[in-house]
Amino acid sequence: MGKFLTVFDSASSALAAAFAMTVGISAAAVAGGILLGLVIGLALTYGGRVLALPFRAVVDIVRGTPVLVLILASYYMPAGLGVSPGPVTAGVAALTIFCAAHIAETLRGALLAIPAAQTDAARAIGLTFGKTLGYVLLPQALRQIAPNLVNTAVEIVKASSLLSAIGVGELLLTTQEIIGRSFLTMEFYALVGLLYLAVNLSISAGGWWLEHRFRLR
Amino acid sequence: MNYVLNFGAVLRGFDDLLSGLALGLAMGLAGLVVGSLIGIAAGYAAVFGGRPARAVVTLYVGFIRNVPILVLALFAFFALPQYGIRFSNTNTFAAVLAIYAGAYLTESFRAAMLIIPRGTIEAAQSIGLTGVGVALWVVLPIALRNALPSVGNNFISLFKDTSIAAVIAVPELTFQARKINNESFRVIEVWLVTSLIYVTACGLLALALRRIEKLFPRF
């Protein structure tokens, strides 16, 4: 325990920076994923055959591919085109696309679950498609998918640990470096597990608070 | 931008990719079977158990579902051997996958048992079945059927999670893909083909699962 405290003390600033990196990467991926997911979800639902088809293909491919493969692909593939985005950009891009595909699919489900009569009624009172979407459909659909957003955010935080495989200095890779120097394998893997647990429980608690604050259910 | 597609290296390694796929499916299936046993037991405890049993299940599910599976795998692979617990890397990952799957499947089976009508269980008791009898002959079959769609979805995501075993050098599909990638630098072809193999496998699994669901009509 004494050795752990000594090592922890000397590594604490690196750990804090890595923790911030994990939170930052996850937040960026979730924020980008929500925006992109909304666009793709709308295109899937209302895009008609021409617009929906390419998005359908992308969403199905992303959802059928493991996150680690998405991360490795977005890290290595651009090199073939002579571009090297760097591990952080490649990693965030992969997590964003993963997040967007899942949100798009849940949003589509939520939009389709709203009775068609509501759209007819909105049109009957003279709302344009944009207004129908903004005032009638999206407010209901977004409430519906709110619990899903919390789950997706937790999944993204967990998936961000895979960025260690392409050399992003996030929480897990930094912990592995500390373990490589100190050989406190058990202690630091336990610590990093607890740190991920803390982040994810905070997300769940935050989601729970928001749901009750805005009486989403 | 002068990249010319050449699938030669990927095709030469295609057997390795397929054997990697088979290993991934095998680990996924092992994780599903053992995970289901854990999930059935823990789900039963969560629905019908006393307060201490429910608390243990809540802790297990809450802990496992909020920690990355990579952290669990690295812990099992690097930390446990220091305490004399040592398996091959494939078995280590399969075991981690089972414990990980168990937490998700606990939720599936808990939900499947919660929707069994109270009257069904009372009817079973009134014809003289004991607690074990009710659990084995009434709760279990109904829960298995109710949980089937969710268990199937879990299998697909478990299969995708087996890609993470590449990090501890289990020679599954992603590991083989990375090997071809590093040896040939055919970066676009390798990941295109690997992704398509995963997508196809997941698609076929989903189709097969839908078939299986139809074989067992809902109660």
Image (cartoon, rainbow, N blue to C red):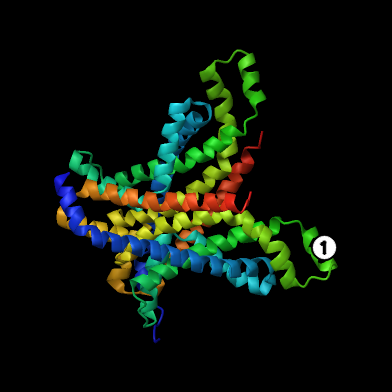
**Chain ID, mark 1:** A
Residue furthest front as drawn: A213
Q: Position of residue A67 (x, y in %)?
A: 43, 60
Locate the N terminus of chain B by quadrant.
bottom left
Is residue B215 found left or right of A207 in the rendered image?
Answer: right
Which residue appears at 23% of the width and 46% of the height?
A186
Which residue appears at 35% of the width and 79% of the height?
A84
Residue furthest right as drawn: A124
Label 1, residues with CA under 10 Å away: few <14, some 14-19, many ≥20 = few
Is residue A18 found left or right of A28 in the rendered image?
Answer: left
Residue denoted by label 1: A121
Locate the C terminus of chain B by quadrant.
top right
Give the secondary structure at mark 1.
helix
Q: Position of residue A26 (x, y in %)?
A: 42, 62
Is residue B85 found left or right of A200 in the rendered image?
Answer: left
* Camera-side residue of A37 and B129: A37
